[in-house]
Image (tube, rainbow, N blue to C red):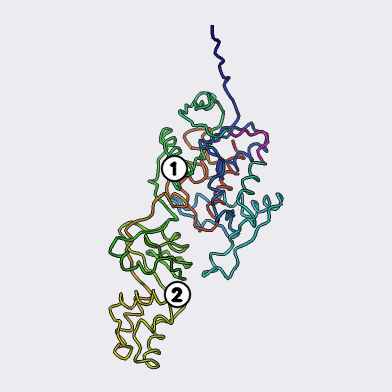
Amino acid sequence: MTILSIEPMKTADVIIIGAGAAGLMCAGTAAARGRRVIVIEHTRKVGEKIRISGGGRCNFTNLYCGPDNFMSQNPHFCKSALSRFTPQDFLEMVKASGIAYHEKPYEDYADQSARGQLFCDESSRQIIELLIARRDRAEILTNTKVQTIEQTTEGFHLHTSQGEFESASLVIASGGLSIPKIGASNFGYEQAKNFGLEIIPPRAALVPLTFDPALLQKTASLSGLSVDARVSFEKTAFREGLLFTHRGLSGPSILQISSYWEEGQPIMIDFLPDQEVLEALKSARKTSPKQQLRTVLAELVPQRLAQLLAEGSGHDERMADLSDHKLAEIAAFVKSWRVLPAGTEGYRTAEVTRGGVDINGISSKTFEAREVPGLYFIGEVLDVTGHLGGHNFQWAWASGWCAGQEV
């Protein structure tokens, strides 16, 4: 007769689903309070998004992170967490761990409002190691898939690929849909819906924009060209680097505006944000009347871009033949190139997901679901999306820390 051994039920005070930035921060914080914590991660490794961020050096926070750097249906929701756990708080953890870091040099910023980005000098793995080192009394299980979650009179019961688990508190820190190759899924959204929470429709954010074939043909020669530009959509604008690609547009300014852009609507690009273009053109007409417009523009922007702008303006003529009215039209074209993206590159290359669990059903102080005691949502799974430059990591740290104080 064969005797089958039955794995005992694993119990904990807190179970956290997702071993990313928010989940690991929450685990360490709760463990420091003496809570018994189990972290469940469905992939083989923890902190993969941390590992690949910042070119492998992790832009782990931003010194000037604040509520204005975030988007959500309720712009006030993030204020409490960001004030309770600040960039300086995380920086103190970095210093205490002996991690060397640096701020992105000021000269690298076209717009000084983008300053304050902090990176590891060596490797993003140092941030993962910092978070793991805080996990006393916390057990991390990787390659473990949660199959069902049931609410019980004492908390929550989880059926997983590694057996049964129970806990008084359950934290969903499973992230959004961005970068599926490292394990992104809709798990958090589905669980939220199962417990009666609303979902703000998710979409790719901080993502390159694409062109249709006709526009790609016009811009093909510009692929790989990077310029300083001010990019705007409606009343929102960002001034940072812009990169032409073989698919469309990328670079920091494009990634930033992509979070605000609405499909079917144009964006505006100012290729010379510091230049009085009309005055420069009038001056060139006096000093170089025989030159073609594209030659004059090539003194202001890269030659390949100058040709595109000259042809696109419809006035690629000798300067002497250009009236004040035509010069004004050219200047307006250079300062506000209207371009209609066909779409985005999608979740494959998106840095974050906009939308997610409706925060109107979540406490901004504790991150507990208002109608489901003991159930918490933190990090990217929520409808809170930060700007490029370390803000999304600061949201993960802040929301994870706040929930960790409560579970």
Q: Is residue 3 left or right of residue 277?
A: right
In this picture, is 199 found above or below 301? above
Type of amino acid under label 2: Pro
Q: Which numbered mark, 2 or 1, is in the foreground of this view?
A: 2
Q: Which residues are magenta?
A: 134-140
On the image, numbered disc 1 is attached to which residue? 357
In the image, residue 136 lies in the stretch drawn in magenta? yes
The residue under the point 38% across, 64% down is 233
Type of amino acid under label 1: Val
Q: Earlier in the sequence, mark 2 or mark 1?
A: 2
Quarter of the picture containing the C terminus is top right
Q: Residues within 10 Å of mark 2 (few under 14, many from 20)?
A: some
State the mark number for residue 149.
none
In this picture, is 191 found above or below 90? above
Q: Is residue 194 left or right of residue 138?
A: left
| Residue 98: percent from left, percent from top | 71, 52
Q: Label 1's element?
A: strand
| Residue 132: percent from left, percent from top | 64, 41
Q: Is residue 76 left or right of residue 294?
A: right
On the image, numbered disc 2 is attached to which residue? 273
In the image, residue 262 lies in the stretch drawn in magenta? no
Q: Nearer the viewer, residue 140 or 154?
A: 140
Labels 2 and 1 touching (C-beta < 8 A): no
Quarter of the picture containing the N terminus is top right
Q: CA distance from mark 2 to mark 1?
A: 38 Å
| Residue 391: percent from left, percent from top | 54, 55
Query: Which quadrant of the view contains residue 317?
Result: bottom left
